Amino acid sequence: MRLERKDLLGIRDMSRDELDLILDTAGPMKDIIGRDLKKVPALRGKAMVTVFYENSTRTRTSFELAGKYLSADTVNLAVATSSVQKGESLRDTIKTIEVMGFDLIVIRHSMTGTPHYVARNTSMRVINAGDGTNEHPTQALLDMYTIREKKGTLEGLKVAIVGDILHSRVARSNIYGLSKYGCELRVIGPSTLMPAEIEKLGVKSYHNLDQALEGVDVVNVLRVQRERQQSGLFPSLDEYANLYMLSPARLRRAKEDVLVLHPGPMNRGVEISSSLADGAQSVINEQVTNGVAIRMALLFLMMGGTRDEITN
Amino acid sequence: MLDPANDINAVMDVLVEDGIIKELKVNIIDPDAVVVDATGKYVCPGFIDMHVHLREPGFEYKEDIASGTRAAAIGGFTTVCCMPNTDPVIDNAAVVSFVRQRAARSGVVNVLPVGCISKGQAGAELTEMADLVAAGCVAVTDDGKPVAQAHLMRNALDYARMFDLPVLSHCEDIGLVGDGQMHEGHFSTLYGLKGIPAAAEEVMVARDIILAGMTGGHIHICHASTRGSMELVREAKARGVWVTCEVTPHHLLLTDEIVGDYDTDTKVSPPLRSAEHVMALRAALLDGTVDCIATDHAPHHWESKDCEYNLAANGISGLETAVAAILDGLVEQGELSLEEMVRLFTTGPAEVLGIDKGSLDVGADADITILDPEIAKVVDPERFYSKGRNTPFKGRTLKGWPCMTIVKGRVVAQDGVIVGG
């Protein structure tokens, strides 16, 4: 099997078969990361470029590393020092990159829909590494992989997503992905950070964290950005922490074997208590490792061959 | 023949002489006349679009009076009102004269300028409205920019009242709009774009109605797009407030669902709304709440649409598709009678503006629009006369098109082609 689509722009329009294929392919990729010699020739001769119009530590590094483990030539376009600073349009930047011969572009952009625009205008394959407040598909895939690895299945799990749901592309991609596996989804946050008609996405929304944590299998904690407070959406980080910080005491309402996820970077003491971030239930570091495996799987399925090739 | 102003809906002939309507009668026989055979078609008073951005002067790369009026003629319009957010803005008599001269020289339909409410559209000082009226303005507006200060709108309504001048209001509370990109609702949540709530429009509609009631001035709500706006206008009309409103074909026919591909041609201000709002607008067409249909024709250069959604300009190039879209989407579907449609494009806007247009009165200018209800065509922006190809109707097959446009007795457009270039 291989991924037939040209681009990976979001989880929303993906089928469960496609998601299964990616998650299943990430397993053998993770084995490669665990080896002493972490290199396979699967994508030798292929070239990819990461273009990040927004800051990133883990997503960008893990895409680059994933490409390198698979022997693709990987290049980072440093947007801060590129022609973008001279006012070049996105259309021209993308065309320039395309004619250099890249097979695939990984793009992050602060504006929703930009990877879709790029995909329509280039023959390169496009992976969305986060667009505005829309989707962050590889984050959701690595979250799903992490949960599935620990719990054995995604089917029917109760998952809570806590924080700034309104602006979170991680939340959207997780909702679109997990709902395809019949998870019971709960989103929790202040009403000013909750999108319009959120329950139409098949989730239940809560403003009270304690209530929402009752009996959940997984809690995914979102980063809260200071600029949201400054734009008047909530009064202070202190009040936010009082109402929504995940702490050991609050987590006792969840199932005993609950998993705590966070996409990073964390604000310790704001959305998650420090002890919990480093605690036994936290899988935050595993998420990062799995992120490399998931991105290897995607690059392989999009630029290389079939899953059988890597497992046999 | 359909002439709502004279209550005519019958098979008849019209005789035009020297650009004037000479006679309306069943079976006119005049051996010297050139005969236009409109059998099986609808002969109507020339359509009026009271909300058009012709972009000249200043933005001729988007549109100019020559291209915009040709687009109007193709779309079945014999009269357009041009909005003043040009460069320089139309805020004094000199610019009005310039626009009228350009229209006389390069235009092919009647162009009625609309002046600014405030000098430089800066939202501070009133324009010299008496002078604007004397120069030929039929209304005032700061369209494109809402009048943020309530006291300025109060003064504008109060002052314009002396000249029976309608004040056209682009109703949007800028703070509530924020950096929103589409209607706020289920689809903004689904697509991850920042939403613009219906309330952003409604709070200002409410404010302007209150101010119109207080001053006795005439407020006209531009491109009204929400259920709440319709309720406010309906209620105010019942109380006798001098309020009128227009709706656009795109707000009547398209919903926010189509934003899903992030196609920037779907980006417009106010945004395409959800189905519930679309249904409310359609209901308001039928009960008299809506006075007219106007395009808010907003042509843009391709570069300002071929970019990131957030960076794309707002607006739809609407002149060439408006009538066909309404014929196909509402009349053909049985939701709106042809007579009602003609009224909304003729006497409706003429009454809002207080102009002597929109009828086939004997002695009136021979502005005539002929519709062919049977012809079906695909919307192909590449063939537009407008310089703006930005339309979300592209690729759709529409049934029912204007087939002839006559301005002051002269055929300016026929079968989708401008006559005489």
Image (spheres, coloured by chain):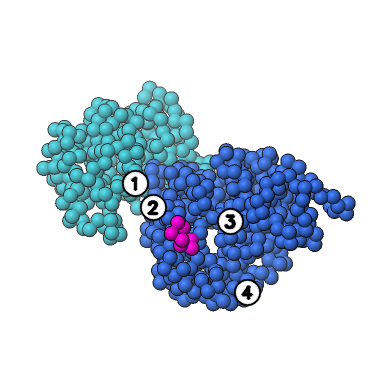
Q: Point out residue B290 in the picture as x, y percentages from the top left corner.
A: 51, 53
* Camera-nearest label, 3 or 1: 3
Q: Amino acid at mark 3?
A: Gly
- Chain under disc 2: B
Q: Residue at x 55, y 49 (%)?
A: B249
User: Is residue A258 rendered to the left or right of residue B75?
Assistant: left
Q: Amino acid at mark 4?
A: Ala
Separation of disc 3 and disc 1 at Cα?
36 Å
Q: Amino acid at mark 2?
A: Pro
- Chain under disc 1: A
Crowdedness near tag 1: few (<14), some (14–19) or many (≥20) residues, C-alpha within 10 Å: some
* Camera-nearest label, 3 or 4: 3
* Camera-nearest label, 1 or 4: 4
Residue designated by label 2: B197
Q: Determine which of the numbered discs, if any, sits on residue B348 in the image.
A: 3
Residue designated by label 1: A196
Q: Please tell me whether mark 3 sits on a helix, a strand or a loop.
A: helix
Q: Colour of chain B?
A: blue
Query: Which quarter of the figure is the C terminus of chain A placed in?
Result: top left
Separation of disc 1 and disc 4 at Cα?
48 Å
In the image, are marks 3 and 2 on the same chain? yes
- Chain under disc 3: B
Q: Please tell me whether mark 1 sits on a helix, a strand or a loop.
A: loop
The front one of A102 and A123 is A123
- Quadrant for residue A1, please give it: top left
Q: Amino acid at mark 1?
A: Ala
Residue designated by label 4: B135
User: Is residue B363 rendered to the left or right of residue B335?
Assistant: right
Q: Residue at x 57, y 43 (%)?
A: B336
| Residue A226 at least partly seen | no
Separation of disc 3 and disc 4 at Cα?
24 Å
